[in-house]
Image: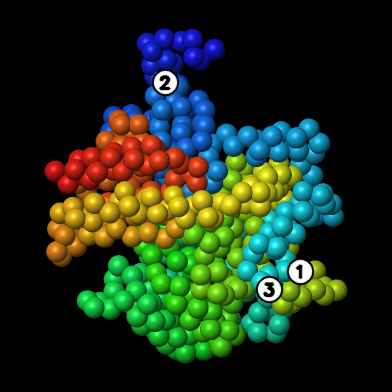
């Protein structure tokens, strides 16, 4: 048993695993040259609740829900059991020409909880694929309606939609986009409604509405050429957890409808209660033409995604001709294990007052972060539901950031890790996006270590 090993044995085992990994693996979103010296690779043997347990015997509080995937904690027994049960029955089956109950049940369940007016579910296996599907479906739906002039997309500055070429094209984060720019589609970028950029004296709502006017101008300048607007409702997560007022999403819906374009809501990160409501679109009172879901869809257990759309879009594809059909597919479309995990996760929302409990937890997060507002290197503390972000700057009055080459964020990351907390700053934005089950003691530890991380980043 792991527990019987002494500390020296566990440390040795972790070191061995680290060395074997670095001999054969290539990690995502990582400059591998930073391993092993600048960045310690952390071998994990299991996860329980909000905690990860290292092979070296140390515990880490997963304050980022393992890249925003986890909802109810690691090892959530109901989801684990559902996957195990499903694996005994049917692990996978081709989803063209065949179907199975978990896929049907999940589609029914998703449509029940999604904003009203969505009527069809198309499955894939990751968030980027869901974005590709929404983009292709939007273009193709217009084409099938006899409109071949709509070929451009509108995306928001500072947005992020994934890493495959189409999804990356819609993103505006230079770090990810720059290198591949010669290969990418060129959407029309509209200014972000980010409330952090509000003019002096302007409210978040006024800022959002001003930006919506600029969006409208973009549509008017490109009349009849736009397939869809894609946006992350309420929180631009990868773009530094920047937040905007729901009024923008409401106006964006109106503008798209008025100009015959689709609205694609990318709720891959903010869906399933993360924003404070089941879906962020609810806070704007709108229904998008496409709702992209992944990450929390399976409670953080299985790679899976779904694109929900309207009957109107679906019916544009019905015809005798195969050319008019949506021929997109992924081998693992509708994977039963993913469906079983997602169903188990959704049933937790039904059997427990998840959103109400989250409101209490979010209130505690706000209270614990409050003292940081006075910190001389904190320019902003912002929150949307179970996402709280702290903008660390070199100079508070001008909000000037540190030179990225100083890698200040990395200092914060290392400090937190050395103190048993997984924080993964986006640049110099520290954020809390914990599993919903995080308890008071863990939240207090998180606040304490975050304060230390800010000291380390700014000294
Ligand atoms: C993570 C993310 C994606 C991409 O999902 P992957 O599963 O990583 O491909 C797309 N959009 C948003 C808003 C995301 O946060």
Q: Nearer the viewer, residue 288 or 111?
A: 111
Q: Which residue is mark 1?
A: 325
Residue 64 in picture, x, y percent from top left: 42, 45
Label 2 SS? loop
- Queried on whether the Cβ of the residue with tag 1 lies below 8 angstroms from ligand 1, the answer reads no
Is residue 367 in view?
Answer: yes
Residue ID for mark 2 = 57
Pointers 1 and 3 in contact (C-beta within 8 Å): no
Q: How is the image coloured?
A: rainbow
Q: Is mark 2 within 8 Å of ligand 1?
A: no
Indicate the position of residue 101 as horizontal and vertical percent values.
81, 49
- In x, y percent, where is residue 277? 53, 62
SS for dot 1: loop
**Left or right placement of residue 332 versus residue 285 in this view:** right
Which of the two marks, 1 or 3, is nearer to us in this view? 3
Marks 2/1 in contact by CB < 8 Å: the verdict is: no
* Of the image marks 3 and 2, the number of the one nearer the N terminus: 2
Give the residue at x 55% y 43%.
72
Of badges 2 and 1, nearer the viewer stands: 2
Neighbour tally class for label 2: few under 14, some 14-19, many 20 plus, Cα within 10 Å: many
- Residue sitting at x 54%, y 12%: 1
Q: Could you tell whether 163 is left or right of 427 in the image?
A: right
Question: Which numbered disc flags the more N-terminal residue, 1 or 3?
Answer: 3
Q: Residues within 10 Å of mark 3 (few under 14, many from 20)?
A: some
In the displayed structure, 374 sits above or below 69; it is below
CA distance for labels 2 and 1 = 53 Å
Task: Residue at 21%, 48% (x, y): give it.
Answer: 405
Question: Residue 117, labelled with which disc?
Answer: 3
Q: Residues within 10 Å of mark 1 (few under 14, many from 20)?
A: some
Which type of secondary structure does the marked residue at label 3 adopt? loop
**Residue 32 in view of the camera:** no
């Amino acid at each position: 048993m792991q527990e019987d090993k002494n500390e020296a044995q566990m440390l040795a085992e972790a070191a061995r695993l680290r060395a074997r990994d670095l001999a054969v693996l290539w990690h995502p979103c990582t400059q591998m040259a930073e391993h092993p010296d600048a960045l310690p690779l952390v071998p994990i043997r299991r996860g329980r609740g909000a905690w990860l347990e290292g092979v070296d015997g140390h515990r880490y509080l997963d304050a980022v829900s393992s890249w925003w995937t986890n909802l109810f904690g690691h090892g959530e027994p109901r989801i684990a059991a559902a996957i195990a049960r499903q694996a005994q029955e049917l692990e996978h089956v081709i989803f063209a020409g065949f179907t199975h109950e978990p896929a049907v049940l999940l589609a029914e369940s998703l449509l029940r909880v999604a904003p009203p007016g969505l009527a069809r579910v198309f499955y894939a296996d990751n968030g980027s694929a869901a974005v590709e599907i929404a983009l292709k479906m939007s273009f193709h739906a217009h084409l099938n309606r006899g409109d071949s002039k709509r070929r451009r997309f509108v995306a928001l500055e500072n947005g992020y939609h994934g890493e495959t070429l189409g999804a990356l094209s819609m993103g505006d984060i230079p770090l990810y986009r720059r290198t591949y720019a010669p290969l990418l589609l060129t959407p029309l970028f509209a200014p972000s409604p980010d409330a952090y950029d509000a003019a002096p004296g302007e409210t978040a709502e006024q800022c959002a509405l001003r930006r919506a006017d600029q969006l409208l101008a973009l549509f008017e300048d490109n009349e009849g050429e736009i397939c869809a607007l894609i946006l992350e409702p309420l929180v631009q997560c990868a773009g530094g957890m920047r937040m905007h007022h729901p009024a923008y999403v409401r106006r964006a819906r109106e503008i798209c409808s008025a100009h015959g374009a689709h609205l694609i809501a990318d709720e891959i990160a903010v869906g399933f209660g993360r924003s404070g409501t089941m879906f962020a679109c609810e806070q704007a009172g709108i229904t998008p033409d496409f709702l992209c879901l992944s990450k929390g869809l399976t409670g953080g257990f299985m790679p899976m995604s779904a694109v929900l759309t309207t009957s109107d879009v679906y019916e544009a594809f019905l015809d005798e001709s195969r050319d008019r059909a949506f021929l997109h597919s992924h081998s693992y479309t509708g994977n039963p294990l993913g469906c079983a995990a997602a169903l188990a996760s959704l049933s937790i929302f039904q059997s427990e007052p998840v959103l109400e409990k989250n409101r209490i937890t979010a209130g505690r997060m706000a209270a614990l972060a409050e003292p940081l507002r006075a910190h001389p290197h904190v320019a902003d503390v912002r929150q949307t539901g179970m996402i709280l972000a702290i903008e660390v700057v070199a100079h508070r009055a001008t909000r000037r950031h540190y030179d990225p080459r100083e890698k200040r964020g990395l200092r914060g990351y290392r400090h937190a890790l050395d103190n048993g907390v997984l924080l993964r700053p986006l640049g110099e934005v520290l954020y809390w996006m914990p599993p919903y089950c995080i308890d008071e003691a863990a939240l207090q530890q998180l606040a304490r270590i975050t304060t230390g991380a800010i000291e380390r980043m700014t000294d």
